[in-house]
Amino acid sequence: MTDNATDLPTPKRRSVVRRWLYPAAVVVAIAAVIWWLEAGGDGGVSSTGERYGPVALPVALAPVGANVSAEEGALAPDFLLQALDGEETRLSDFRGQPVVLNFWATWCGPCRKEMPQFIAAYDAHREEGLVVIGLNLQESESIIRPFVDDFGIDFPVLIDRDGEVGDDYRLLGLPATYFIGRDGVIESAFIGPFQAEERGTNVQGAIEQSDLEGRIAAILGSGEDDGGG
């Protein structure tokens, strides 16, 4: 008799299958499920049957030949996402209102540092129609909710579960903020943290709160003469 496994008596061969092949198959199956979820296989489906993530702008809001892209001077790409409170939100629903779209994550230190400024800006300008959207990138509700509660965030927090909206906006890092006028056009964009009343900071690319207020003032005034486009 040789030592080759194929020459093992049938009972021993079955034992090898049970002890090694079955557990290995289970591990592979679990790994496949995890990969599928993380790759966006379960990004979620809305109550209307639409998949959460980037969506086409309604024809009435996107003239033929209009540039729809994540760049200044272009119409902001539309999306449909679920909020932390369960509400479904479409960016284009806010056409006619100025929108501050802030991409963030709880693990992002600069995001944590700048968040109070967005809360203060929203509280100061919400009566003027300002919309602030905190768009969390690929974190679970159990992680997001304590952050929202701790900071007292009172504006909508949406969840980009599979990261497709972030991809559509071509994010180069976090935080990232887009200032969208009443006509749906991106008036300005900034990648990096807003620093509150700090001069000479060592944080590369940081800008002051006055710049944040200036950008908000610009979109608050956009489209007012023509009734919001």
Image (tube, grey):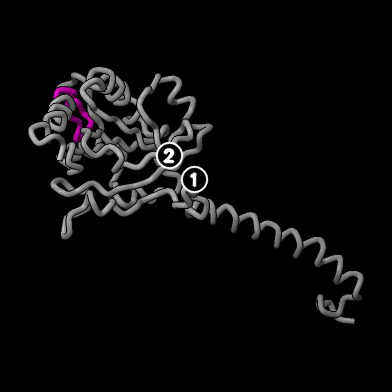
Q: State the residue in front, 228 or 166.
A: 228
Residue drawn at x 25%, y 33% as measured from the top left: 100
Amino acid under disc 2: Glu
Q: Is residue 205 magenta?
A: yes
Label 1 belongs to which residue?
47
Where in the figure is residue 94, as x and y percent of width and height? 28, 37
Q: What SS does tag 1 mark?
A: loop
Amino acid under disc 1: Ser
- Note whether 186 is above or below 151 in the view shown: below
Q: Residues within 10 Å of mark 2 (few under 14, many from 20)?
A: some
Residue drawn at x 29%, y 43% as measured from the top left: 92
Label 2 belongs to which residue?
88
Q: Earlier in the sequence, mark 1 or mark 2?
A: 1
Q: State the residue in front, 54 or 138.
A: 54
Region rendered in magenta: 201-210
Q: Is residue 29 magenta?
A: no
**Left or right, residue 109 beside residue 143:** left
- Note whether 73 is above or below 212 in the view shown: below
- Note whether 50 is above or below 178 in the view shown: below
**Left or right, residue 83 beside residue 23:** left
Q: What SS does tag 2 mark?
A: strand
Where is residue 195, by image quadrant?
top left
Where is residue 223, by image quadrant?
top left
Residue drawn at x 50%, y 32% as measured from the top left: 143
Which of the numbered marks, if any, corresponds to residue 67? none
- Note whether 30 is above or below 198 in the view shown: below
**Do the numbered discs 1 and 2 sit on residues whose CB atoms are within 8 Å?**
yes
